Image (spheres, grey):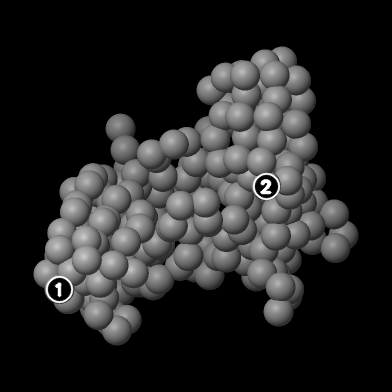
Amino acid sequence: DAGVTQSPTHLIKTRGQQVTLRCSPKSGHDTVSWYQQALGQGPQFIFQYYEEEERQRGNFPDRFSGHQFPNYSSELNVNALLLGDSALYLCASSLGTGFLEQYFGPGTRLTVT
Amino acid sequence: TQLLEQSPQFLSIQEGENLTVYCNSSSVFSSLQWYRQEPGEGPVLLVTVVTGGEVKKLKRLTFQFGDARKDSSLHITAAQPGDTGLYLCAGPRGGADGLTFGKGTHLIIQP
């Protein structure tokens, strides 16, 4: 039973560039949530996708956008990258939009130079 | 202002000792979760507490949810080096605001 997978593992981008991160949920899950975790901090909720629509959103600017595909996989897009966007980006999947049983992927480490 | 305050921020103890870490808030949560995260990995869910006053045990780990559902604690008995990691508490903010995490407690168990 495959768990949550994320790609790529690491990524280095330059300020002003755009980036796309990918997530495949755990088998049987239909909801994907994205989090940003800065070094030494707890994860911060970015948004959640269910039935191919953004259902909930944290306090992140519009530069952060996402998409969910019919197979429940998801992408996180960040435009006009800033140095402060450097972080570990975590994807979590669940069955339904509640947060009681979330499974996290290993994350994508994004470095913006 | 952090919605969930975790303490201590760092803790380093010897193998075999007992410890307690705390997660506090001024807000009421419908539930609280505890995760453990190791370097280079995503958080792994340890437990979810839902009822005020609830106590759950997971081997040497004991989790408690405060009666008012504003705080929680994690107690580890006879800590082992394998318990080393970042312990995070998290709870739903309600509405459409997703899940809120504390900053975590960095725990190191020295052999």
In this rendering, position of residue A5 left or right of residue A60: right
Instruction: Name the foreground residue: B94 vs B34.
Output: B34
Q: Are marks 1 and 2 in contact (CB under 8 Å)?
A: no
> Which residue sits at x=53%, y=23%?
A84
> Which residue sits at x=53%, y=56%?
B42
Q: Subunit of mark 1?
A: B
Q: Looking at the picture, does residue B62 appear above or below residue B101?
A: below
Percent position of residue A53, x then y: 76, 49
Callout 1: SS: loop
Q: Name the residue at the top extreme.
A: A16
> Which residue sits at x=15%, y=59%?
B13
Quarter-of-image position of residue B32: bottom left
Instruction: Name the foreground residue: B4 vs A7.
Output: A7
Percent position of residue B59, x then y: 29, 84
* Residue type (three-letter) at the residue carrying disc 1: Gly
Q: Name the residue at the left extreme.
A: B17
Residue designated by label 1: B16
Q: Is residue B66 visible?
A: no
> Which residue sits at x=34%, y=44%?
B103
Q: Is residue B3 visible?
A: yes
